[in-house]
Amino acid sequence: MRVAVTGAGGFIGTELTRTLLRDGRLIDFHGREKSIEQLLLVDTHLPPQSDPRIVPLRQDLSEADATCAVAAWKPDSVFHLAAVLTTAAERDPARALSVNVSALAQLIEALGGMQTPSRLIFPSSIAVFGGSLPDIVDDDLAQRPQTSYGTHKAIAELMLADATRHGLIDGRALRLPIVLVHPGPPTQSVSDRIAGIVRDAVAGRDVIVPLRQDTRVPVASVQTVATSLIALHNATRSTLGGLTAINLPALTVSMADTVAALRQITGEAGRIQFSPQPELETIVASWPKGFVSNHAHRIGIVPDANFTRIVAHYIAGLKNV
């Protein structure tokens, strides 16, 4: 199989690439298990790679010829991860629209002429949901995004569903909760403030937790995200039952849970302090406390078991950074 990953140099893209190379096989459009013969990695910056299966393409996907270059490579499957994230999208909505929506439309059009439709796997986001939310959000809740990023993801889900209906691609979207633990450097996103708690504790630095002990958030490890994207890719169309987008069920943790896990692993008791910031609390209070799926279990997608395992995965992965 020929597999392409856009946004391959990012946090999730790097982990997905590592997992694809390690596993070495995917299920093709016809339901057959096939070896990954080549892996096209697309991004403006890519980490050094020595695996002979890798074909690097250092290009911005919003450039006019980039999506055509991906389609001309004739991939059997595409994991389309390239995106402008929440904070950057609010600062520059025009560029975000170009990357998050227009590039996807161009990619679908470019792939649409293939004899066998490419399977296009897309990470959507919890951000498609907004407004007054119930504590538990499932796959079928009405989407009312409150950010440009969430709006773009909702548009992309509809584009994928429509292109799949027309037989241009076999599109599938997995909505992600907060994904941990980004190795840094720190960003201005609220979710990265949560990741920073783990980064600082593991690095032996003093930690200030900017949320109350009882504040609860839905999270997933980057390893679970990577394996879940692959599970969604490999699912049969009959198992999906006509669905093109589902939630990635999350592990819900309180800030007290995160601190307990960190103290258990790092032994840094006494160096972690709570100092809640009202503006952050207001933002996080608008998020769902639980993120679940009525369908993910059918294809083997389950939440992380506990926060201690997420921290352990992060520490183990530091050698790859």
Image (cartoon, rainbow, N blue to C red):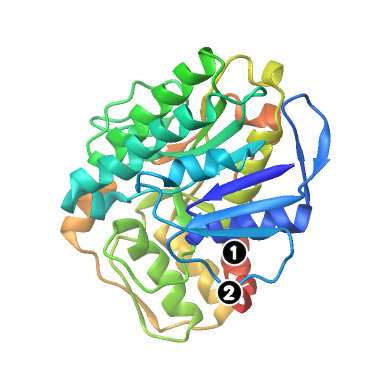
Q: Position of residue 32 (x, y in %)?
A: 83, 30
Instruction: Measure the alpha-carbon separation of dots 2 and 1.
Output: 8 Å
Classify 272 as above or below 289: below
Q: Could you tell me which residue is drawn at 60 percent across and 43 percent down?
A: 73
Q: Position of residue 106 (x, y in %)?
A: 40, 33
Mark seen at residue 163 = none
Q: Residue at label 1?
A: 308
Can residue 260 be seen from the camera position used here?
Answer: yes
53 vs 186, left or right, is right
Q: Is the Cβ of the residue at disc 2 closer than 8 Å to that at disc 1?
A: yes
Classify 279 as above or below 154: below
Classify 141 as above or below 39: above
47 vs 66, left or right, is right
Q: Amino acid at mark 1?
A: Thr
Find residue 19 and report its image quarter: bottom right
Q: Is label 2 in a helix, a strand or a loop?
A: helix
Q: Could you tell me which residue is drawn at 54 percent across and 38 percent down?
A: 71
The quadrant of the rendering that contains the C terminus is bottom right
Classify 127 as above or below 178: above
- Mark 1 neighbour density, 10 Å: few (under 14) some (14–19) many (20 or more): some
Q: Is label 1 in a helix, a strand or a loop?
A: helix
Q: Position of residue 80 (x, y in %)?
A: 50, 42
Q: Which one is in front, 314 or 133? A: 314
Q: Which one is in front, 20 or 194? A: 20
Mark seen at residue 264 = 2
